[in-house]
Amino acid sequence: MAAKTASKTAAKTRLVPLADRLVITPLKQEEVTTSGLVIPDTAKEKPQQGEVVAVGPGRLDDAGKRVDMGLAVGDRVLYAKYTGTDIKLDNVDYIVLNEKDVLCKLEV
């Protein structure tokens, strides 16, 4: 019986949210104001807009039934300022947060 060999290709790690959590990538803020002033990194606020990249299956209600999420992959959202868990994976910034921390969906 031949021994199994490890694949030499690196598997890309995926974030799979559970329950009513979702994964977003924060959108970059404008680095120049409308008047032309450049904002340094130290003066920038944490962004509050992001794009949904993964959605959990939804939470369970008191009766044990699954409540579907109101968001889908690709939605742009506005979320609470200091919420969620910041993660950097494969040089990409992500935020994992609960659906209740999303303030609204942005329609462009």
Image (cartoon, rainbow, N blue to C red):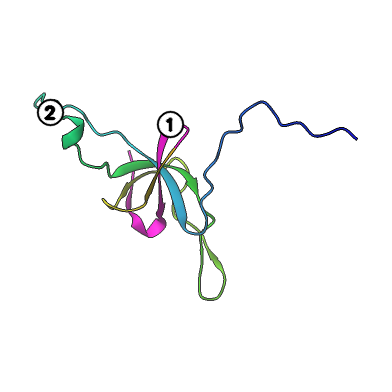
Q: Nearer the viewer, mark 1 or mark 2?
A: 1
Quadrant of the rendered image containing residue 39: top left
**Residue marked by disc 2:** 34
Q: Point out which mark residue 43 bears.
A: none
Q: Which residue is mark 1?
A: 91
Q: Name the residue type under label 1.
A: Asn
Q: What range of the chain is rendered magenta?
A: 89-108
The N terminus lies in which quarter of the figure? top right
Q: Nearer the viewer, residue 23 or 73?
A: 23
Tag 2: amino acid: Thr
Rendered view: 94 above or below 61: above
Residue at image location 47% in from the left, 47% down from the top: 72
Q: Main secondary structure of the magenta part?
A: strand
Q: Nearer the viewer, residue 78 or 70?
A: 78
Q: Position of residue 83 (x, y in %)?
A: 32, 53
Q: Determine whether, in the image, residue 39 is placed left or right of residue 10.
A: left
Location of the C terminus by quadrant is top left
- Left or right position of 87 against 31: right
Rendered location of residue 37, percent (x, y): 10, 26
